[in-house]
Amino acid sequence: VGNGDCTDTARRLLEVAELDLKIAGPERVEPGDMLLLEAHADQPFRVTSWMPERFFYDQAAYAQHFAPDTTREYTVVGISDKGCVDSAFHTVIVNPRTMVPTAFSPNGDGRNDRFRVITWGEPSVIRSFRVFDRWGNQVYGAVGSSADRGWDGYVNGSPAEVGTYYYAIELESAGSSLFYKGDVMLMR
């Protein structure tokens, strides 16, 4: 402060309030398991929202109980009694599950027309998907995203014969390689 020839300085330490919001909950769950996420902080606060919103019917609840469908990040936003706003993030991994059907019917009715791998939980990438006839001849082969569609039951443009076929599938999920071998029945 100054007024002509005189100046003076005053100092005051200001304490800025802040909210340190956190989410407690497991880091991994099995598909179909119920998950409990809880918001907490070291001071009074109220929850203003949870995201993704479609999983949380009560946006103001301090605890949320639901069944996650896949690996994802969840967010809670809160505000303290002093008006401080904070958010916290928590990623939950849903362990991978894979189902390989034992039969399919490529008859064009729109149901079960393709032999394909069904996965849920942690995202999986099909590295290799091969199908063989009973003599060991490869009748279908695909890698990467084209393997997600699966085999349509055709060989060289013609419908494959009804019968048993054999498969070898390699998937990658959560940094691990998974291998599946077995047989599938083609029915019409």
Image: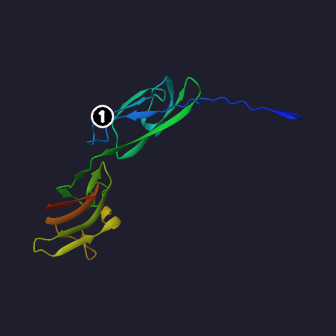
Q: Which of 109 and 183 is in front in this view?
A: 183
Q: What residue type is labelled 1?
A: Met
Q: Position of residue 94 (x, y in %)?
A: 30, 45
Give me the residue at 27% from left, 37% from top: 33
Q: Where is residue 89 in the image (x, y as percent from the top left)?
A: 44, 40
Q: Nearer the viewer, residue 82 or 62?
A: 82
Q: Quadrant of the C terminus?
A: bottom left
Please say whether residue 110 is visible from this viewpoint.
Answer: yes
Q: In the picture, residue 9 is in which quadrant?
A: top right
Position of residue 54 relative to residue 179, above or below, is above
Of all residues shown, which one is farthest toward the right?
A: 4
Of all residues shown, which one is farthest toward the front?
A: 5
Q: In the rendered image, which residue does mark 1 sit on? A: 34
Q: How is the image coloured?
A: rainbow
SS for callout 1: loop
Q: How crowded is mark 1: few (under 14 residues within 10 Å), some or many (20 or more)?
A: few
Q: In the picture, residue 139 is in which quadrant?
A: bottom left
Count of numbered circles in the view: 1
Q: Position of residue 25 (x, y in %)?
A: 34, 35
Please say whether residue 116 is visible from this viewpoint.
Answer: no
Q: Quadrant of the N terminus?
A: top right
Give me the residue at 23% from left, 52% from top: 98
Position of residue 112 relative to residue 86, above or below, is below
Q: Which of 12 and 20 is in front in this view?
A: 12
Position of residue 81 relative to residue 172, above or below, is above
Give me the residue at 47% from left, 33% from top: 21
Q: Where is residue 6 in the image (x, y as percent from the top left)?
A: 85, 33
Of all residues shown, which one is farthest toward the left?
A: 135
Q: Please give left or right for residue 62 compared with residue 156 in the image.
A: right
